Amino acid sequence: MDTTKVRALHWADETAEKIIREKGQNNPAKDHYTCASGITPSGTVHIGNFREIISVDLVVRALRDRGKKVRFIYSWDDYDVFRKVPLNMPNREELEKYLRFPITMVPDPWGRDESYARHHEMDVETALPLVGIYPEFLYQARNYRSAKYAGGIRRALEHREVLKNILNTYRDGEHQIQGEWWPLSVFCDNCNRDETDIEGWDGEWKLRYHCKACNHRAEEDLRNAKGVKLGWRVDWPMRWEYEQVDFEPAGKDHHSQGGSFDTARHVCKEVYGWDAPVSFRYDFIGIKGTPGKMSSSKGKVIDLPDVLRVYTPEVVRYLFAGTRPNTEFTISFDLDVIKIYEDYDKTERIAWGDESAKDEGAFLKEKRIYELSQMPEGETSAMPAFKPYQVPFRHLCNLIQIADGNIDKALDGIKRKGAGSGVLPGEEHIPLLLARCRCAKYWVEECAPEEFRFRLRRPGEIPDKDSPGGLGEKDRAGVRLLRDTVVADIGRFGDDKSCAEAIYLCAGKAGLEGKEMFRAAYRALIGKDQGPRLANFLRTVEQNRLMAILAAY
């Protein structure tokens, strides 16, 4: 992308310009920015969590499109407390033995990785490259245990009263902090739980604690302590300053008035001397047909790999690039999937100039959404090296079913016959087509409503006329006429319209209403009263196969 022509066409561009304006105003030469995201791997990292990750990724790309160097960090808060066993976890009774441990010390119930935390981290780290996202991962258990934050912890202890007053500013009277208070917790070095009381601090580096769970007492030196951790509303701003974070979004729960972001902003400036990052609020994501927001702790989740089984990486990116972060939306797995693919394909046609937008502004916006939806070929956004070959998702699902679920067979048909435009795909188009074929197969077999699914009958497979789905004599005569006058000469129809006209003409000759002819044809071919658009269907299925099925009539 020509960085001299980048404008605020998209919400990610608007955010990038705001970051440059606010964080670079006192340093015009600033060309390096840090963008951050993160989560506690307390359970399955679901698609709602992914919204923050991809929102940061889109802003990172917008900054890079402006010629800025960007560090994109993703923090795994794996030194948080394991508070609750999610409902979708195996070996729940075994996991309950590790409640109040740091998550990084909980064993992996699947036995695949070295810890419970690492299992969930690996699931995300292996999935993100599939959608073109490559952050630098930070592991907070490692950082805390290496005493990287010793200075930040001591600073919090030195400003205990200031922190207490800041926190109380955002609490109502019932929840005010009273009496002695400490801005940190300690994992006991004897039993590993955080059920400890701080008994004293020497004003420098030594901290004494008592464990209520095992009655252990010990003294820790912050410069080599393994189990000391700041509380969330102090830990977050401490790390903003430590990593020099310029941008980090947060969910609407954190961005509520007087919520954790407001508190952290205040702490960051007053205690750590760093201006809080530019931010925005992102909203929750729902799943079509599932009430309420997703929750890892309740086990009610859909994760990124689940979504990638139905949507190609570009369409996944499009779902988020095409929606403002503060807008709630749902991920659909029903018939809406077809509409989402249609919307993406329309944006693609507009971006390539194959379809007109309503005006220049709409064209630029759609093109920008499309650019940000693509898998990156470098650090900046750009149009793909070649225009993809479009096969409508609905049509592709039909092709997959006509091919009895055989992707290679369906793809071979596209290579030989195209997708109805008269243009055949080139070899460069096959990888993207194959990815869409895999999504179509999964969706139609695992997600599509029953009325959308079909199976072509086998030759000789004909139901008794009195059975459900059977055909009476008049319908059979109509099917024979359709076979002998339309299917037998299907090659003469250059488009669906002329074929449809011949079907209606055939119905009239058979003394059937149009809808009666369609129903008879569907029953004969797929054993249902409805199916794909009949003219296109007849022109798509191999003629010999149709004739063999209808020969029994």
Image (cartoon, grey):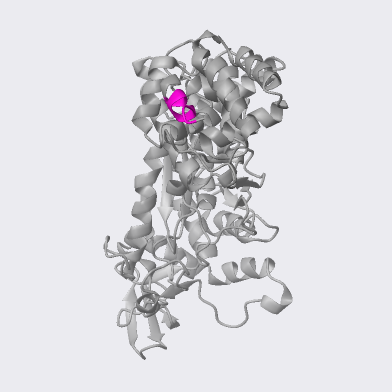
Residue 391 shown left or right of residue 8 in the figure:
left
Relative to 287, is 61 above or below?
A: above
Q: Residue furthest front?
A: 473
Residue occupying image coordinates x 49% and y 66%: 156
Compare residues 439 and 17 and report the one nearer the observer.
Answer: 439
Estimate the x, y position of residue 200 in percent, counting from the top left. Answer: 43, 82
Estimate the x, y position of residue 489 in percent, counting from the top left. Answer: 51, 12
Residue occupying image coordinates x 62% and y 42%: 325
Relative to 100, is 276 above or below?
A: above
Judge whether residue 549 is colored magenta: yes
Examine the image and state in which quarter residue 43 appears.
Answer: bottom left
Task: Examine the rendering and report whether any part of residue 135 can be seen.
Answer: no
Estimate the x, y position of residue 157 in percent, counting from the top left. Answer: 47, 70
Judge whether residue 489 is colored magenta: no
Q: Most prominent secondary structure in the magenta stretch?
A: helix
Q: Report how many numbered discs are placed on residues in the image.
A: 0
Compare residues 220 and 121 and report the one nearer the observer.
Answer: 121
- Magenta residues (range): 545-552
Relative to 485, is 63 above or below?
A: below
Task: Examine the rendering and report whether any part of residue 173 can be seen.
Answer: yes
Residue 293 shown left or right of residue 215 in the figure:
right
Estimate the x, y position of residue 335 in percent, counting from the top left. Answer: 60, 41
Residue occupying image coordinates x 51% and y 52%: 49
Compare residues 282 and 152 and report the one nearer the observer.
Answer: 282
Compare residues 8 and 531 and report the one nearer the observer.
Answer: 531
